[in-house]
């Protein structure tokens, strides 16, 4: 397991030890969705991948590790709902199509309450979302990461058995630096990158159907080639999808086969069989 040499050198604590999976959970594939900065639509990509994988008959869960800025519950129509428990374990909320979700917003009295937690408390929350949640058998557990490459990201990569990373970016001048941060973090954590998804890549003219690159020509192909990673898709700016997310209706509104290459990359990840949940869980 990777350690934080900077913390050790400073005489501080390293990241927590790997969290154990409880016997009522079994995630065959754990895939993290990461961005080098905020505001690029990482949670939308996480939700889209979850919906597409569920449509293909998979059992899917989302661990919302964006503790201070959670948006997954609202996107999946869970506003106002709260996680419950059985014994010492939390029970994830379940969307209309069967996607299981655990998020800090499901533990707050009101979804608009701020999460004013320091790093160790946030790390404890992620442990609860993994070790103390009864996920049951899952084909895929997607981890919606917080933006950037800070303490929470380190906790996830050092404590959860992440099988692969999907990097989300946008077509702006800083894309190379943002991707570099994510790639370098993945390399240090020894986790493979499945590829890059460019969000807000273009907008389609409603009159003529022409694709307009709002942020200028995309640099995605050259950046991906420079870092030796695959391009998994380009997503347009779509106001109707934004409205659907705000209304908690992404499962109904998401077009079919929006990210076929990204889904194929997720399906190519070798599943690991644990000693956790049975099919009856």
Image (cartoon, helix red, strand yellow):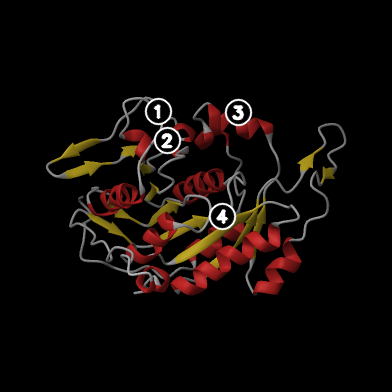
| Residue beneath disc 2 | 73
Q: Residue at x 67, y 48 (%)?
A: 235
Task: Name the element at disc 1.
Answer: loop
Q: Which of marks 3 and 4 is in front?
A: 4
Observer-nearest residue: 36 or 197? 36
- Left/right placement of residue 91 relative to residue 78 reads left
Observer-nearest residue: 144 or 136? 144
- In this view, 215 is above or below 79: below
Mark found first going from the N terminus, 3 or 2:
2
Mark found first going from the N terminus, 1 or 4:
4
Mark found first going from the N terminus, 3 or 1:
1
C-alpha distance separating marks 3 and 2: 15 Å
Task: Name the element at disc 2.
Answer: helix
- In this view, 135 is above or below 274: above
Question: Label 1 near label 2: C-beta < 8 Å?
Answer: yes
Residue 166 locus on image (x, y percent)? 54, 60
Residue that sits furthest to the right in the current view:
208
Residue 193 locus on image (x, y percent)? 53, 68
Q: Residue at x 17, y 57 (%)?
A: 23
**Quadrant placement of the N terminus:** bottom left
Q: Which of marks 3 and 1 is in front?
A: 1
C-alpha distance separating marks 1 and 4: 23 Å
Crowding at label 4, few (<14), some or many (≥20) Cα neighbours within 10 Å? many
Crowding at label 2, few (<14), some or many (≥20) Cα neighbours within 10 Å? many
| Residue beneath disc 3 | 243
| Residue beneath disc 4 | 35
Numbered circle sitting on residue 111: 1
Q: Which of marks 2 and 1 is in front?
A: 1
Question: Label 4 near label 1: C-beta < 8 Å?
Answer: no
Give the image quarter of residue 180. Answer: bottom right
């Amino acid at each position: 397991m990777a350690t934080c040499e900077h913390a050790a050198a400073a005489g501080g604590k390293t990241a927590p030890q790997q969290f154990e999976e409880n016997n009522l959970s079994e995630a065959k594939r754990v895939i993290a969705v990461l961005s080098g900065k905020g505001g690029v639509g990482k949670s939308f990509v996480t939700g889209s991948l979850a919906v597409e994988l569920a449509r293909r008959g998979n059992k899917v869960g989302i661990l919302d590790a964006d503790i201070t800025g959670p948006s997954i519950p609202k996107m999946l129509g869970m506003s106002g709902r709260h996680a419950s428990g059985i014994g010492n374990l939390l029970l994830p909320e379940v969307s209309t199509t069967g996607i299981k979700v655990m998020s800090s917003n499901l533990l707050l009295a009101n979804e608009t309450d701020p999460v004013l937690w320091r790093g160790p408390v946030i790390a404890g929350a992620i442990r609860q979302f993994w070790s103390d949640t009864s996920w049951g058998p899952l084909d895929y557990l997607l981890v919606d990461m917080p933006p950037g490459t800070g303490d929470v990201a380190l906790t996830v990569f050092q404590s959860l058995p992440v099988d692969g990373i999907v990097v989300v970016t946008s077509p702006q001048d800083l894309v190379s630096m943002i991707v570099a941060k994510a790639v370098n973090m993945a390399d240090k954590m020894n986790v493979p990158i499945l590829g890059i998804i460019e969000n807000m890549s273009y907008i389609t003219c409603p009159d003529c159907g022409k694709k307009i690159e709002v942020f200028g020509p995309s640099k995605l192909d050259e950046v991906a080639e420079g870092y030796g990673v695959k391009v998994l898709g380009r997503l347009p700016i779509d106001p109707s999808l934004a409205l659907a997310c705000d209304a908690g209706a992404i499962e109904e509104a998401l077009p079919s086969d929006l990210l076929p290459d990204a889904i194929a990359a997720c399906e190519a990840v070798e599943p690991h069989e644990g000693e956790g949940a049975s099919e009856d869980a």
